[in-house]
Image: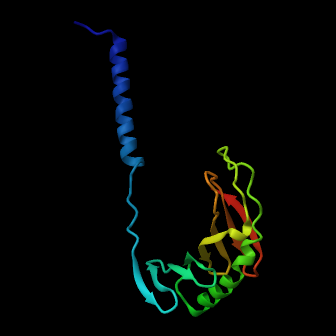
C-alpha cells in the first residue's frame, strides 16, 4: 500500500512543528521559582513586633491611639530608626487633615458600579508606606463602599503636598 506524497509531506511538517514547539518550550519557557522571602519578627518598644525582611525593609501592624484604629506601617529602607518613628509621629498627627482633602470618587468604577455616600472625614488609612526621601503613600479604607471597586491612594511629598488617585 502506498501513501500519497502529500500525506508524507503533511506528516513531516506536523512532526517538525511539534519538535520546534518542544524545543522552544524547553529553551524559552522556563518557570523559575522566586527565591523564598526571608524575614525575622523583632520586638520593638514603640511598634510592638515588627517584621524585618532580608532586603532591609520592614513593616508593622500597629494600633494608633491618636487615629483610633489599626493600620500597617511600612518603610522601604532599613529600620525602624528614630528618624522614621519621628516622621511617623508627625504623619500620624497630620493624617486626618490630609485624608480630608481626598476628592470625591469617580461616578463609575469601570465595572458599572456607582459609589456609595462618600465622606472624606470617614476615611481610614489601612497602609502607610514611608519612602527613603520621607515622602509617603497612604492606601485607604472607604467605609460603606459596597461593590464599588476603587479606593483613593494618597501620595505625599516630603514637604506635605498630597496628590490623590482613585485606583482598583
The N terminus lies in which quarter of the figure?
Answer: top left
Q: Nearer the viewer, residue 86 or 15?
A: 86
Q: Nearer the viewer, residue 78 or 139?
A: 139
Q: Which residue does the image show at 74% across and 53% down from the upper left?
A: 106
Where residue 10 sits in the image (x, y, percent)? 37, 19
Tell whether 102 sits left or right of 35: right
Quarter of the view holding residue 54: bottom left
Where residue 18 sits in the image (x, y, percent)? 35, 32
Q: Nearer the viewer, residue 98 or 159?
A: 98
Quarter of the view holding residue 117: bottom right
Tell whether 22 sits left or right of 147: left
Where residue 148 sits in the image (x, y, percent)? 64, 52
Q: How is the image coloured?
A: rainbow
Quarter of the view holding residue 152: bottom right
Where residue 86 sits in the image (x, y, percent)? 63, 90
Task: Decide if residue 59 is in sight here.
Answer: no
Q: Nearer the viewer, residue 21 or 140?
A: 140
Position of residue 130 relative to residue 46, above or below, is above
Tell whether 22 sits left or right of 54: left
Tell whether 151 sits left or right of 22: right
Q: Which residue does the image show at 34% across and 14% down from the upper left?
A: 7
**How many numbered marks, from 0 up?**
0
Position of residue 6 relative to residue 107, above or below, is above
Task: Decide if residue 123 is in sight here.
Answer: yes
Furthest-top residue in this view: 1
Q: Which residue does the image show at 61% across and 51% down from the upper left?
A: 147
Furthest-left residue in this view: 1
The C terminus lies in which quarter of the figure?
Answer: bottom right
Q: Which residue does the image show at 75% across and 50% down from the upper left?
A: 107
Amino acid at each position: 500500500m502506498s501513501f500519497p506524497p502529500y500525506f508524507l509531506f503533511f506528516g513531516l511538517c506536523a512532526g517538525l512543528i511539534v519538535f520546534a514547539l518542544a524545543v522552544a518550550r524547553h529553551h524559552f519557557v522556563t518557570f523559575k521559582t522566586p527565591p523564598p522571602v526571608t524575614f525575622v519578627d523583632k520586638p520593638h518598644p514603640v511598634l510592638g513586633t515588627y517584621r524585618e525582611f532580608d532586603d532591609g525593609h520592614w513593616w508593622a501592624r500597629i494600633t494608633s491611639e491618636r487615629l483610633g484604629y489599626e493600620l500597617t506601617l511600612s518603610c522601604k529602607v532599613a529600620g525602624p530608626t528614630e528618624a522614621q518613628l519621628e516622621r511617623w509621629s508627625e504623619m500620624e498627627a497630620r493624617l486626618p487633615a490630609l485624608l480630608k482633602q481626598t476628592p470625591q470618587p469617580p461616578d463609575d468604577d469601570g465595572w458599572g458600579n456607582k459609589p456609595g455616600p462618600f465622606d472624606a472625614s470617614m476615611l481610614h488609612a489601612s497602609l502607610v508606606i514611608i519612602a527613603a526621601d520621607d515622602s509617603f503613600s497612604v492606601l485607604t479604607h472607604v467605609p460603606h463602599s459596597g461593590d464599588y471597586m476603587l479606593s483613593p491612594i494618597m501620595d505625599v511629598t516630603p514637604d506635605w503636598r498630597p496628590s490623590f488617585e482613585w485606583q482598583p
